[in-house]
Amino acid sequence: MKIAIASDHGGFELKETIGEALLKKGIETMDFGTFSEESVDYPDFALKVGEAINNKEADLGILVCGTGIGMSIAANKIDGIRCALCSDVYSAKMTRGHNNANVLALGQRVLGDGLAMMIVDTFINSHFEGGRHQRRLDKIKDIENGYKGNDGNEA
Ligand code: RB5
């Protein structure tokens, strides 16, 4: 499994901690930056991770900013990306199982390192359950593709 990681300045420290921890576990990472606490714009980094997933260079992504909110909003604008902002372990498990989330967003200013790593481990080790959940993801894809109506026909 390969994990694409990135942050803005507000998530830099936690992104570094996650990267080091994943390496220690033998999990390959692609680090798209940022590489310092100098101010940058989070959408630039969300896009890099989203592209890595869509290009199949990475299996999953992890994005960190101050709250995780900006990263999750930006990542979810990218076709094919299902980004879940998680601050608890239950949500991390369920968003893989039910939403097949392919990107996890975290807030460095929200979480301690210990909880953040438990969320990361849970996200990586949980699996999509398929079935009725796939039908719902298909409907999300329809929205992504410009579906506007509510009767099965394009508006
Ligand atoms: C940067 O100060 C901060 O706005 C950013 O890291 C993030 O929290 C945005 O959602």
Image (cartoon, rainbow, N blue to C red):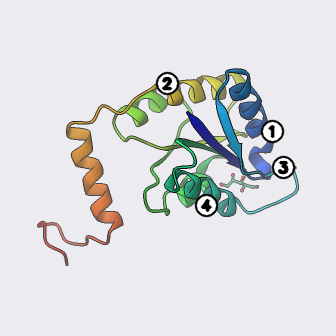
In the image, what residue type sits under mark 1?
Answer: Glu
Residue bearing mark 2 = 125
Q: Badges 1 and 2: C-beta atoms under 8 Å apart?
A: no
Tag 3: Cα neighbours inside 10 Å, few (<14), some, or many (≥20)? some
Going 71% across and 32% down the picture, which residue do you hit?
A: 18
Q: Earlier in the sequence, mark 4 or mark 3?
A: 3
Distance from disc 2 to disc 4, alpha carbons, whole Å, reads: 24 Å
User: What is the x, y in percent for residue 17?
Assistant: 77, 31
Q: Counting other residues with Cα less than 10 Å from the Cα at mark 1, is it few (<14), some (14-19), or many (20 or more)?
A: many
The residue beneath circle 3 is 35
Q: Read off the residue under disc 1.
A: 13
Between the residue at mark 1 and the residue at mark 2, the CA separation in whole angstroms equals 23 Å
Q: Is residue 143 left or right of residue 55?
A: left
The mark nearer the N terminus, 1 or 3, is 1
| 10 displayed left or right of 111 | right
* Residue at horizontal 44 percent and vertical 26 percent from the top: 126
Give coordinates of residue 78: x percent, y percent. 49, 62
Q: Earlier in the sequence, mark 2 or mark 3?
A: 3
Q: Disc 3 residue type?
A: Phe
Above or below 47: residue 15: above
- Give the residue drawn at x 60%, y 22%: 118
Which residue, given by chain and number where applicable, does mark 4 sit on? 47
